[in-house]
Structure formats: C-alpha cells, structure tokens
Image: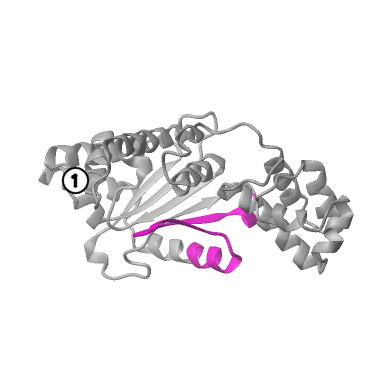
Amino acid sequence: MPPRSTPTARQQRLGGELRKLREQSGMTVQQAAALLGVDRTRIPNIESGRIGITAERVRTLAYNYDCPDTGLVDLLAAMAQERTKGWWEQHRGVLPPALLDICELEHHSVELHTAVTTHIPGLLQTEAHARAVFATADPPLPDPDLRARLALRMSRQLVFERERPPLYEVVIHEAALRMQFGGPKVARAQLEHILGQSERDGTTVRVIPFTAGGFPGAGQSFTYAVAATRQLDTVQLDTSHGSMLLDSGMKLRRYRGLLERLRTLALPDRASRDFIRAIARDL
C-alpha cells in the first residue's frame, strides 16, 4: 500500500505518540524497524502517519519501548484498528482538511471545553447565524463552498445526538453574544438557541461580562478536547489562518490553566442564562 499523501490529524497523532514512546525509550529507528522486521524507512512513515500500523504491532512496539501506561497503549491500538470512515469524509477534497480534523477530534472526545471571545462556537450556531457568518468571508466564498461549509457545521452538532455525547462546557465573552450576524432577528434566535442548549444535560454555558475587565488569552478562541486518557488530549485553536491543533504536554498544561482562569471570571450558570436573556430582550 503506498504512503498516504495527506494523513489525517488523528493518523498523525497516532504516529507522533509512537515516536514519543520510541524516543523516551532511547531506541533508534533502526532498532524499531528490526522489532517489526521491516525496512528502516517504514518507521518514519509510520511515525508521520503516512503509513498505517496494526494494533498488534502497536502493542509490540509499546512493550519493547517499556511503556508502563496500559491505558494509553490500549487507546493507541484502538486508533490503529479504526477503519470506518467518519461522516465528514464525504467533504474530503471539497473542504480544507483542517475543518475535517475538527470533526474527527470532536467525534473522539469525551469532553469539550470551549472558550470564545468574539464569535459563537460552531457547535452552538443556528443555521441562519452560520450562514450570516460565512457570508462575511473575505474574499467571498463560492456558493458550493459556502453550502459545503454550512452542511459541515450543522452536521458537527450531531455529536450531541449520539448515545454517549461528550460533556460540553462553553465560556463565552459578552462581546460574542452582542455581535449581530444576520441582524437582530437572527441574533435573537441565536441567543434563544444557546439558552435552550444550555439546559441540556451535560452542557454548561457561562458568560464573561465586559465588567470582568481584561484577562489572559483575550482574543483567543480555543477548544480543549479531553480524550479517554489525558496524554491524548488536544487543544484546537481558531486563528485568522485557520485551525491549529496542539498536543505537547506544556501547551496542554497552559490551556488547562487558562480555562481555570476564565472560569473564575465567568458568571455562574443561572446568572449566565439571565445575562443572555437580558441581551436578547434588548434586540
């Protein structure tokens, strides 16, 4: 099988974790290749996600790398066994791979913690609001691309319809709630939708009001995706140049700390809902 030309973020993450384990063990690429009985060039391709690996070989490598975390090894082996393509694959070749990586990340997460300052999170957007947001793109999106992005954004919300949906926490700044994409009517419906979603089991929405003043990370929008084991947690950043995924231990610790700081500034759940209702009444 030829190497993948564009491995997904999840495929790259599996390879990256195997590389970390190998480097921590002090084993060379040549030694790892000998363990599997393959050419040495195969190991870098596995570790970059360009070539797949079986669950059995994941366990062989982890055992010889002296990895003590059996939970991590089980999850890596499960990642190697994944063969079913997610619903987002229908958009591959049409939309940027980074957008599809977000869908895959959300699908495999057990918790999602989002902090936003200037926009409504995609998982909480109404179709009318999302359409109005996409209409502001510069340069303007071609109609087929706009329709594909809108369909993808709405389909992402199905993650909450599955048997075991992820816990979802949103810390949202007042500025995002007052942005009137699509005009007052669309904005009011969007706020009412957020209120409805905030009542759902497993979902928490808390507001940081203007009166909270400045805070670290102001202007950033990010999601901290919690995996079944902390070592596989991921931070997804929204930037002006697109989405970025971070998974180094140092970055994960930083964003966990930032989330804690934002929680201290946000209003409690019930007060946040009252705050959102008050903004909606003003429209």
In this rendered view, identify the residue nearer to me: 272 or 234: 234
Which percent across, then down, holds residue 18? 73, 56
Any part of residue 163 in sight = yes
In the picture, residue 147 is in which quadrant?
Answer: top left
Amino acid at circle 1: Phe
**Taking 256 as reference, is 54 left or right?**
right
The residue under label 1 is: 181
Q: Which residue is rendered at x = 25% and y = 49% of the image? A: 137
Which percent across, then down, holds residue 29? 80, 63
Q: Which quarter of the rendered picture does the N terminus lie within? A: top right
Q: Which residue is rendered at x = 64% and y = 57% of the image? A: 231
In the picture, residue 253 is in which quadrant?
Answer: bottom right
Any part of residue 227 in sight = no
Neighbourhood count class around disc 1 (C-alpha, 10 Å): few under 14, some 14–19, many 20 upward: many
In the picture, residue 116 is in which quadrant?
Answer: bottom left
Q: Is residue 211 above or below residue 121?
A: below
Q: Which residue is rendered at x = 88% and y = 51% of the image? A: 37
In this rendered view, identify the residue nearer to me: 87 or 249: 87
**Taking 179 as reference, is 202 left or right?**
right
Which percent across, then down, holds residue 5? 59, 48
Which secondary structure, mark 1? loop
Provide the residue span drawn in magenta: 229-256
Residue 195 among magenta residues:
no
